[in-house]
Image (cartoon, helix red, strand yellow):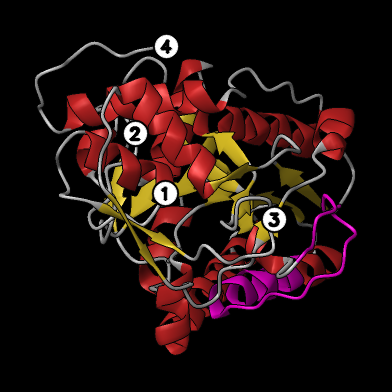
Amino acid sequence: MTVLVTGGAGYIGSHMVLALRDRGEQVTVLDDLSTGLQSLLLPEVPFVQGDIGDDAVLDAVLSDPSIDTVIHFAARIVVPDSVADPLGYYLNNTVKAHRLISACVRHGIKRFIFSSTAAVYGETGSEPVLESSTLNPISPYGRSKWMVEWMLRDTAAAHDFKALVLRYFNVVGADPQGRSGQSGRNATHLIKVAVETALGLRPHMTLFGTDYPTPDGTCIRDYIHVSDLIAAHLCGLDHLRQSPDGFSVYNCAYGRGASVLEVIDSVKRISGVDFTVLQAGRRAGDPASIIADGQALRRDLGWQPRHDSLDEMVRHALQWERKHSNLQPYSIQS
């Protein structure tokens, strides 16, 4: 059988495709290439360039009788951008997801994995959040994902359809084998921005907010290596194939946080570069701290992280950025 990966030419999606092929799964990719790169895909993987909001494209792709599962990554993901352009985010993340889910039901696709986000929790305080914690997203991005979770829950209740929601915390790093990494233009992810600055691709980076109610005044996030995140998807896929459950939700994180200053220190130490960091005010939509309780994923799906060191995540991001940017390599300090 075949897994359709939407957004499969993007950062996380391309890692998903590699992992599926590594274990012998058949894969088809649907991506509009608005942010993804076809060069990240293996040449033997069938690729369709198209929009998940286009019913004609969806009907053409899903008419393949071998497709029995959809893993859905395609979305817009920048929190401050969602505050400035809420309607654009509701269109891309919610309305188009509705069309994709509807097409799956129409074509008898029975399994669906959705990439949700920790942003559905909003301001969480210092305690790790459980899957059952109150949801109170504070940005249109978080709300756009929360709406899709509700659609999947209701669809699973009404149809022969099983959905798994994975709430990502902050995804970082790159494939340890160097086959894929974060390649998007105009990156806003902290570690990628810091790495680009360390490598001289940016003259400086900006630290947004130093007055949060945290130990060092900067935001705290629960970072997860992209390869461990993808391993969670594989566990989830096996779960959907074996379990009668119609709908389930899991946090994807390690259960501990790192502050912005701690991340910057790690990048400086591992790269050996003391780059310039400018300070600015808080960004709209950024909560002070989000840390997960990730035990359910381990307990129920048997997930075992392998790359949960912040320094390892930074090291892999540096290695990928050097390769992708065609820079001359220099010694990486442990």
Q: Label 2 belongs to which residue? A: 181
Q: Label 4 belongs to which residue? A: 334
Mark nearer the N terminus (4 vs 2): 2
Residue 158, above or below 50:
below
The total of numbered circles placed on residues is 4
Is disc 3 placed on a helix, strand or loop? Answer: strand
Mark nearer the N terminus (4 vs 1): 1
Mark nearer the N terminus (1 vs 3): 1
Image quadrant assignment for residue 47:
top left
- Number of the front mark, 3 or 4: 4
Residue nearest the viewer, comparing 125 with 147: 125
Tell whether label 1 touches label 4 (CB within 8 Å): no
- Number of the front mark, 2 or 3: 3
Question: Magenta stretch containing residue 74, yes or no?
Answer: no
Tell whether label 1 touches label 2 (CB within 8 Å): no
Q: Label 3 belongs to which residue? A: 290
Residue nearest the viewer, comparing 51 with 185: 185
Marks 3 and 4, how far apart in space?
28 Å
The mark found on residue 190 in the picture is 1
Q: Which residues are magenta?
A: 124-152
Tell whether label 3 touches label 1 (CB within 8 Å): no
Residue 27, above or below 203:
above
- Number of the front mark, 4 or 1: 4
What's the residue at 61%, 51% (across, down)? 216
Is disc 1 placed on a helix, strand or loop? Answer: helix
Marks 2 and 3, how far apart in space?
24 Å
Is residue 133 visible to us here? yes
Mark nearer the N terminus (3 vs 4): 3
> Residue 207: horizontal and vertical position, in percent?
40, 58
What's the residue at 48%, 34% (across, down)? 16
Marks 1 and 3, how far apart in space?
15 Å
